[in-house]
Amino acid sequence: MRARVCDSADEAVADVADGATVLVGGFGLAGMPFTLIDALIRRGARDLTVVSNNAGNADVGLAALLAAGQVRKVVCSFPRQSDSYVFDGLYRDGRIELEVVPQGNLAERMRAAGAGIGAFFTPTGAGTMLAEGKETREIDGRLHVLESPIRGDVALIAAHTADTAGNLVYRKTARNFGPVMATAAATTIAEVRDVVEPGQIDPEVVVTPGIYVDRLVRVEAGDRA
Amino acid sequence: MRARVCDSADEAVADVADGATVLVGGFGLAGMPFTLIDALIRRGARDLTVVSNNAGNADVGLAALLAAGQVRKVVCSFPRQSDSYVFDGLYRDGRIELEVVPQGNLAERMRAAGAGIGAFFTPTGAGTMLAEGKETREIDGRLHVLESPIRGDVALIAAHTADTAGNLVYRKTARNFGPVMATAAATTIAEVRDVVEPGQIDPEVVVTPGIYVDRLVRVEAGDRA
Amino acid sequence: MTRSKDEIAAAVAADIPTGAYVNLGIGQPTTVADHLDVGHGVVLHTENGMLGMGRAAVGDEVDPDLTNAGKVPVVETPGCSYFHHADSFAMMRGGHLDVCVLGAFQVSVAGDLANWHTGAPDAIPAVGGAMDLAIGARSVFVMMTLFAKDGTPKLVPELTYPVTGLGCVDRVYTDHATFALADGAVTVVETFGSTADELADRLGLELRTP
Amino acid sequence: MTRSKDEIAAAVAADIPTGAYVNLGIGQPTTVADHLDVGHGVVLHTENGMLGMGRAAVGDEVDPDLTNAGKVPVVETPGCSYFHHADSFAMMRGGHLDVCVLGAFQVSVAGDLANWHTGAPDAIPAVGGAMDLAIGARSVFVMMTLFAKDGTPKLVPELTYPVTGLGCVDRVYTDHATFALADGAVTVVETFGSTADELADRLGLELRTP
């Protein structure tokens, strides 16, 4: 169904339920959907599983969501950063679960969810403690591990421009996980700096086709942390 | 290594060896690399395995390569078309082998080759005669079949514009298999209508990053059949 | 009176919700587009890498770089997009299309589909995107005549033709009736020129009525 | 005299061929860029979705939407391109990068790499793209000190730290020597301040000389 342009971020996330798996775009701060995360904090949904590359920086965005006590588990590749003190504290206090996934497997597992691939053999992580308990197989003389899709109930992503058909374009390395997460969630919500009419984005340069986008929220550039 | 702009298509395909697996872009005639195929016919490499969506139309492009008797086996999704009489004749005479692969598995198997995925479980084709002899597994209540990567020794593709860093953009539905095949071959050769300097293609709109492209041949729009 | 092909296409179109993402395959099902509000209410996907496909191109609109899955030149609609083949089939396989419409040689009561290969020893097999569409779309609609030219039923207890996809068909639109398939049972939605009982007799199947 | 960090970086750079596609990970290895002809001879890949990454951004060049894998703002080079994360890691895993340069806690004589986790019970595990880089690039170069601060060798018979990747390291550049690893054997390429025999003694390893 066509993308719906919401009046507010609060409206966009109003049905995110307790216990939901939420895919959160961004690599560090680039591409992080700050406005949607802030709305999710106001929404107050709890017991969330968050899938994101990092586990929050400083006190903004994902870190603020963690600080609000709404997240039960983080699935990410790199929680430990110089300014990830919110996560660090929760983790050391035993108040949050952590599943570390190699970054390429994290991306590929979400891609598999979006692409209808049931499971895939990857050499990444094979023979390491992150593959413990998982099926392995030697293929062409190389050890592979079988990895499964990661699906989201909802994806919160940030893009640059959308049209009202839901097509998205991104900006520079802020693209990162957005296009993959958009395919992997039952409901995808994108915050964008501009919303234009269908036909105003060249069909050759669309990165995320509108079929993957359910809701749009326009944010002012100044809304960004 | 950086893409090399060849003086001619003949130079570009000069090292395609007998017995090579050649990925050939195009869906029907759209995106078919006519100029490179004609050069491959002049080159005369034999005993080729061709991977392409179709098995040639009328007497041009891939059909001409088949007619020249250079192809031992075709791996494709849809050989039977109203004007595929060259293939039909060879096949009925027992002079060419055929492996039929569901179109999405064909694309995904080449994507796996390019992406370093050892094998993947797909629901497409599971339980059909095209999955006979292949490993199957029920995942989340659904039957899947394990499919393996398809690698090429060389990919021949057509794009619209390249820069000398090898970055490619395509045009409309002529994009089709080009970007996937470019990732799946040891050597990728692209015929393009224009070659520009690095920086003249917006980095946001590059479809095939230059890392996947080894050789470029400029063709006049009028060179197309 | 049985339904004409055009009436069948119109019936399929009437069951496609506004805003749906739809793939019409190749051949007969593409005529469903004539009954859809394409480019506004409904968005057409074509397997060769486009969402927002428009109608057939005419005259100067014909562009060899822009065709549908049947290699017929088409036009763009506002808001369309292009993507490569792996992305296009990821979209199909990943369950993102709301509806696809396919022709068939046979459909079984379990929703198994046969539409890619007659199994005849001299036939050249060609599958294209049929298996991907069969298992990928949220709803799979089949358009076909209910009986082959020799009178043999095409809605059958079990397939005798090679399988395209297992348990994938949701609705079957034919000249004689529309059927809904679920949980191994066939429900007659509406009939044309026969009663449900008469069809059950001719088909040799148990048919439910709504 | 042993080599300085900058001399190690220069030695790594000298072994990277013109035209190579290279990933320099995060941290110390990124200093190799200072010794490369980036944007002309060598093309840098960054895991967060860019090929043709340029130098660190300064002043008005800083753009929060354009960073390297260490989240440091960078600039574009002509001919660069952007892509999403699954495509970026497909590029890495698919063996398309010529060289990647990584730091390490330990490297074994078999080329096994440990660089992501100390295994300490109070450490928060964080792997990032290290495992993808370790198994993906055609050549994996490690930059490290040859001995830990307590004097323990970091080139070892077998890893005691958790594995990042098995049999993946091709060359090890250290303050004391450069080593080439192949087929379970270690060859000393050049030494600084010690002889190969002295290093073999300190490491407790059999070292070949070219």
Image: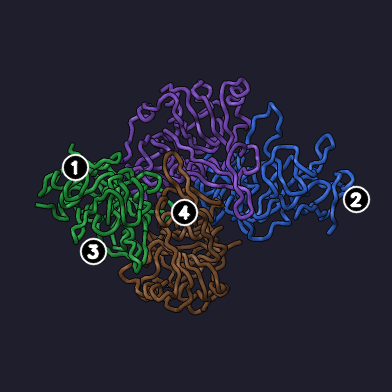
Chain colours: A purple, B brown, C green, D blue
Instruction: Name the chain under label 2.
Output: D
Q: Which mark is residue C58?
A: 3
Residue C187 place in picture, x, y as percent:
21, 41
Closer-to-camera residue (D135/B77): B77
Secondary structure found at label 4: helix
**Quadrant occupied by the C terminus of chain C:** top left
Q: Is residue D206 above or below residue D17?
A: above
Closer-to-camera residue (D123/D51): D123
Q: Is residue B152 visible?
A: yes
Q: Are marks 3 and 4 on the same chain?
A: no
Q: Which mark is residue C188?
A: 1
Camera-near label (3 vs 4) is 4
Q: In the drawing, does residue C24 fall left or right of residue D202? A: left
Query: CB of mark 3 within 8 Å of CB of mark 4?
Result: no
Closer-to-camera residue (A79/B5): A79
Q: Residue D197 carries which label?
A: 2
Going by the numbered disc 1, the residue's amino acid type is: Val
Q: Name the residue under label 4.
A: B108
Residue C7 place in picture, x, y as percent:
15, 52
Instruction: Name the chain under label 3.
Output: C
Going by the numbered disc 2, the residue's amino acid type is: Asp
